[in-house]
Amino acid sequence: MKKWLWIVLIIFLLLNVPAIYSRFTTEWDNNTYEMIVPNDEIKELVDNDPTLKEDHVYDELRKAGLESLSVEPETLKSLEENGQLSIISKEAMAEKMLFDHIDVNGNREFKKNGIFVYVDPDSTYLSSIQKVFEDIKEVKVDDRTFYFIPGDSKKLDDIPLGFNEDVIQKLKSHDFKVVPRISNEIDENNKFVVDQVTSMKDDKSKSFLFLGDEVLGFPNGKAIANWSTKFKENEYSVLGIEFADQKGFASVAHTFDYNVIRLHSINLDDQSNVASVDRVVRAVKERNIRAIYMHLKTGEPKDVLKETTLFLTDVHEKMPGKFHAGIAEPFKHINTPFWSKSVAFLAGVLFATLAAFVVFNKRWAFVIGVLGLIGAIGALFTNSHLLAQVFALVIAVITPIFAIVPKKEIRSFKDIILSYLRAAIISLIGIFIVVSILNGNEYLVKIQVFRGVKLLYILPILFMVVYALWGNIKKLLVTNIRYWHVAVLIVLAGVAYYYLSRTGNEGSVSSIELKIRQLIEETLYVRPRTKEFLIGFPIYLLGLHIMRFNKKVGLFFLIPGVIGFLSLVNTFTHLHIPLYVSLLRSAYSLVLGFIVGVIFIVVFSFIYKYIRTVFKLRWK
């Protein structure tokens, strides 16, 4: 029966190859990255150094490879900073009127919250201000017209009044793409700002970026959909900021059919030029980032300009040849028809059933198979991302356990090699199933993610602890402690401590190791995972070797050994990482892990032989 299950499983896997290939080509063909700088920061450079000419700065940055500049709508605050109007608090206005012997007690505006604004009657922004602030009131003081705007002064300062058309045309004249930024401060009074955005679109300027921590329309779901549809109908793409978690962005992405360009924001003040370059290259190469939003360094304007052009040049030179600078595009649609998803889920059911056959028995295999089928049907016909993610998590947890539980007696080095190959193949099958189930643009741009990473890191290890102890707990409690027992416990404790300190994004890494990592990355394109090729795989091979003459002790080495294979699976659960990057990283880990494992076996054999000779100890 198991033979036929394997045959059907292989057929199901082959049927899913086109869907996986669709993802592979989608990632591989999208190889243009875009560098973006806020135009306000360029303007600040010029304002702080009169000897710097704006046109010269633009030309220098364009020659260095800067493709795009972002622009924000003008606000009362920005217009005041540019000297185009004056904002006067209610208290300051009252003092001025009292100084001019004007009675303020009868003026109703002073009984409300708000601000006074003075703007030149010929200003092009006067009509926008009057249109946006519908409750605006004129106040005459010394033959000058001030405007009282009721409301919260802090919020009034940031309400968009429209984009500066002259600035936009100037940027385009320097061959820059213009990236408009849109805040969630648009309503019926200033919706013309959105019309401005749609009108500035051309062959280059065709993506936009939200401003702040909310998307336009949030928290009203219908408003989010309506605004997003307007941009979509005008053939815009939306930029999604990595790690920003803007509220409502998932709804925007859904409306855009996940035509999202992943953007990474970096402040050049945060680290050295070399570190910033490496960070940008890694983001593009390893995380499907296609837009880089750069905040300039602070300092002397000429120095900042020089360092920025140097940074841009270094990024372009260090970026792998596969990529080129230009206008970023969204990823093409990954073709994942319903039948393909169905086959992926059925493959998962068969895989879990076969795992139960090996680890448990036929009865458990039947139970797990039925439960898996129910879960698969539920996920498919509800089209629930959460159920699909739970199913994928179960397969991910099963995979490393299925891979390393020994199926046959280990009698020779050939058996060790065959067991290692078997574990690698089973891991790749489980990975293939997980990737097939969670396949689509929503996962590629990280709107949806694999859930349960912590469980994937913990459950296989706990299972192997129980598996190694099963049937031996009473015996272990009365066993006399020997020196080698203590040695093994110390080794396992050290591995556990190292593993826990390195797990997750907050793991501690020394400066020396960071340099070694960078060297490996530059040499191999991607860096294999340390916990795989230096811990998990070598200790697994050592455990297999020990099982040749003491199976019980060897089983305990499979506990840290499972780390390598769960990490291998975890590599592919980062679905926003290109498939070819994860494949290359895993191939390096498997090969290097085998080499290090053989070294472990040789060193262990020498030490064990020496100990037996000197102390006349033996395994029991």
Image (cartoon, grey):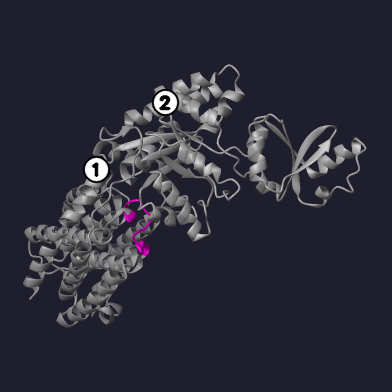
Magenta region, residue range: 442-454
- Above-or-below relation of 260 to 79: below
Residue 111 % position (x, y): 82, 52
Residue hosting label 1: 28
**Residue 158: numbered disc:** none
Residue 484: horizontal and vertical position, in percent?
Answer: 26, 65
Q: Inspect the image, locate mark 2, and give the three-letter code of the amino acid beneath it.
A: Asp
Corner quadrant of residue 437: bottom left
| Residue 414: percent from left, percent from top | 7, 58
Which residue is pictured at 80% across the width and 40% down the height?
Answer: 139
Secondary structure of the residue carrying numbered label 2: loop
Which residue corresponds to mark 2?
A: 175
Give the amino acid type for the residue marked by disc 1 in the picture: Trp
Seen at 30% across and 46% down, the residue is 331
Q: How many marks?
A: 2
Give coordinates of residue 492: x percent, y percent.
31, 62
- Residue most extreme to the right: 101
Q: Residues within 10 Å of mark 1 (few under 14, many from 20)?
A: some
